[in-house]
Image: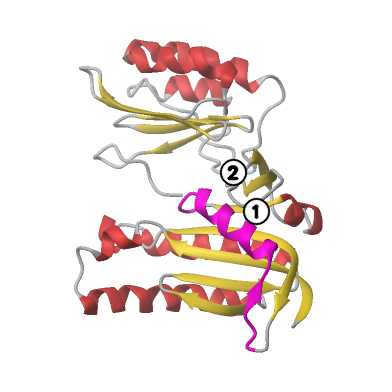
Amino acid sequence: MKAKNLAIMLTDIKGFTDKTSRKSRDQIKEMLNKHNDLVLPVIEKFHGKVIKTIGDAFLVTFESSTDAVLCGVSIQEVLLAFNKDKAHDDRIDIRIAINAGEVSINETGDIFGEAVNITSRIEGIAEAGEVFFTESVYLSMNRNEVPSSEIGYRQFKGIPDKIKVYKVLHEDPVTAENPAEAAAAAQEPQAEKPAADPGSTGARPEGTAEAEALDGLNKMGKMGGLAGMITGLLGKMGINDIDIDEDNGKGRQKVKIQNGEIHVVDKNQEIRIGKDGIRIRKTKPDGEPPKA
């Protein structure tokens, strides 16, 4: 058995068991075939090697950490296009985790070791549509090619040391205006928003985005008590995980605080607030946010 330093990717379809419980065997086969048709060409493009397929999951290795992360980003982009206008049970939403380290390779080509175990643990906390990766990947990849955000340290079962986790940052240049002003304006349906500057990168403006976000959320307080709760917890982002779904009499509003980000969803907008600023997306008519 030989050892080698590799980047390791693990993918799986989130909610696969639930979705397949409502499908026939032929429909499940069709879904898995479509999954393979979408994902495998991307893996090949970035020089990945599929070690094995585990139901709806792929275990893949790369010689390059940069290629592994870029591959993950490209897979999510392909699936984002595929899932557009798809019904819930027909969507293919994938979680992707990447780690880098020394693995043992047996005579059949399968890989083993703590680096593989850590990848599996990271995949367990990844969100659908996201690419999560470890500090070892972050330090060994070309960070100029992929914008990323630190999630923080996590302690995983069976892993003695805490692992620092990152995720790929998705750029959502919805508007070029001040993000706090955009958050407030999102709650005024009659107000027209200035058109985005085509040359804008959507980058976070200089200044304290958290203070600006607090001002915007205070204006949102007119909608109900949930926004007021968010402002009270703004200084404790990442400490508590909260998931609330409430009808305040003026419409349904959802609030989720997790992994250092605040999500507010109403019938018109989804607003995400984190240390990297504020992102705004239109919601579907039923109030559900678009999947990343």
Indicate the secondary structure of the residue bearing disc 2: loop
User: Relative to 87, is 260 on the left or the right?
Assistant: right
- The colour scheme is secondary structure
Residue 86 visible? The answer is: no
Crowding at mark 1 (Cα within 10 Å: few <14, some 14-19, many 20+):
many
The residue singled out by tag 2 in the image is 198
User: Relative to 217, is 274 on the left or the right?
Assistant: right
- In this rendered view, identify the residue nearer to me: 128 or 271: 128
Using the image, determine if residue 112 lies above or below residue 244.
below
Q: Which mark is residue 133?
A: 1
As for residue 110 lying within the magenta part, the answer is: yes
User: Relative to 77, is 26 on the left or the right?
Assistant: left
Going 68% across and 28% down the picture, which residue do you hit?
205
Where does the image place residue 198, in percent across and percent down from the top left?
59, 43
Going 49% across and 77% down the picture, which residue do you hit?
53
- In this rendered view, identify the residue nearer to me: 33 or 109: 109
- In this rendered view, identify the residue nearer to me: 242 or 229: 242
Indicate the quadrant where residue 243 lies: top left
Where does the image place residue 220, in percent across and percent down from the top left?
40, 16
Using the image, determine if residue 282 lies above or below residue 54.
above
User: Relative to 232, is 111 on the left or the right?
Assistant: right
Distance from disc 2 to disc 1, alpha carbons, whole Å, reads 31 Å
Q: What range of the chain is rendered magenta? A: 108-129
Going 39% across and 12% down the picture, which residue do you hit?
221
Where does the image place residue 234, in percent across and percent down from the top left?
54, 18
Q: Would you say the residues marked 2 and 1 are in contact, meaning their CB atoms lie under 8 Å apart?
A: no
As for residue 135 lying within the magenta part, the answer is: no
Going 61% across and 66% down the picture, which residue do you hit?
9
Using the image, determine if residue 91 lies above or below residue 205.
below
